[in-house]
Image (cartoon, rainbow, N blue to C red):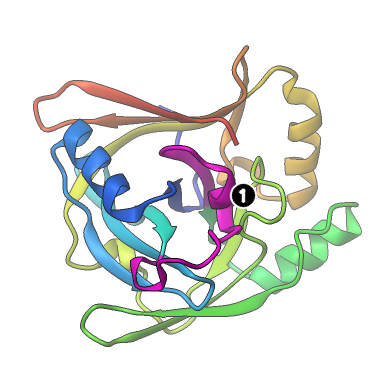
């Protein structure tokens, strides 16, 4: 089993959110719960992740253009503007101290970007606020950092769930990515990097019938 110790959530993105939710439900039997809209022009739906039968705090974020803003240019977040279909695009980790982690990474030669605030409203009107580093206009092969502050972590909420088996990054030459991950100073808190011919993320889930499902992305 390979699961990042500091995993917060895994991002599966697509060019159409409703189609993405239907695609995920068809493959897993789990229909993601509506999450809300972001000021960045995206909207999401969420599925909690369990590990060894225990709930999170981890979740899957299905994200696409906000349907309420149809007609606008596709958002660049997570490379959505370049996607033709669903793709496992990114992941977030939650270090104990996001500001100290960023400062330490910079000292070791890698800049994760500025820590900035973001928010969304749930369908019920609740405002969720968090702080994070870059999300997809930057490097998608590295985790972005997130700090929920006083906002409850969504993976612990009232969501449908699915079991997480493993989550890894595949690279033709893992050495360079491993060096940058080392600069982040997260240890086993980040995804393991494996050698393979098709670079991207490999996400393995266990379905209700016990069968495994592997989803991939080429970010």
Residue segment shown in magenta: 66-91
Quick one: quadrant of the C terminus?
top right
Q: x, y percentage for residue 195?
A: 64, 16
In magenta stretch: residue 45: no
Asked which quadrant contains residue 205, the reply is top left
In magenta stretch: residue 90: yes
Residue 65 sits above or below residue 100 on the image? above
For image coordinates 17% across by 31% down, the residue present is: 207
Quick one: quadrant of the N terminus?
top left
**Tag 1 residue:** 143
For image coordinates 28% across by 25% down, the residue present is: 213
Neighbours of disc 1 within 10 Å: few (<14), some (14-19), many (20+): many
In this rendered view, identify the residue nearer to me: 114 or 43: 43
Residue 25 sits above or below residue 104 on the image? above
Q: x, y percentage for residue 14?
A: 43, 46
Residue 56 appears in view = no
Q: x, y percentage for residue 158?
A: 17, 66
Residue 54 appears in view = yes
Q: x, y percentage for residue 54?
A: 22, 48
Q: What element carries label 1?
A: loop
């Amino acid at each position: 089993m390979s699961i990042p110790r500091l995993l917060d959530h895994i991002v599966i993105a697509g060019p159409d959110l409703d189609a993405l939710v239907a695609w995920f439900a068809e493959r897993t039997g789990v229909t993601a719960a509506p999450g809300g809209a972001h000021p960045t022009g995206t909207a999401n739906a969420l599925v909690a992740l369990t590990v060894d039968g225990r709930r999170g705090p981890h979740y899957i974020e299905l994200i696409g253009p906000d349907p309420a803003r149809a007609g606008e240019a596709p958002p660049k977040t997570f490379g959505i503007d370049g996607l033709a279909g669903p793709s496992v695009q990114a992941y977030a980790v939650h270090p104990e101290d996001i500001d100290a982690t960023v400062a330490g990474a910079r000292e070791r030669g890698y800049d994760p970007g500025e820590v900035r605030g973001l928010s969304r409203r749930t369908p019920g009107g609740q405002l969720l606020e968090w702080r994070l580093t870059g999300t997809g206009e930057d490097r998608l092969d590295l985790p972005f950092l997130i700090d929920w502050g006083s906002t409850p972590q969504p993976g612990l909420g009232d969501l449908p769930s699915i079991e997480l088996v493993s989550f890894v990054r595949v690279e033709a030459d893992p050495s360079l990515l491993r060096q940058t991950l080392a600069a982040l100073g997260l240890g086993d808190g980040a995804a393991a990097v494996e050698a393979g011919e098709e670079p991207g993320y490999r996400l393995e889930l266990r379905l209700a019938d016990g069968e495994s499902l592997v989803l991939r992305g080429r970010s």
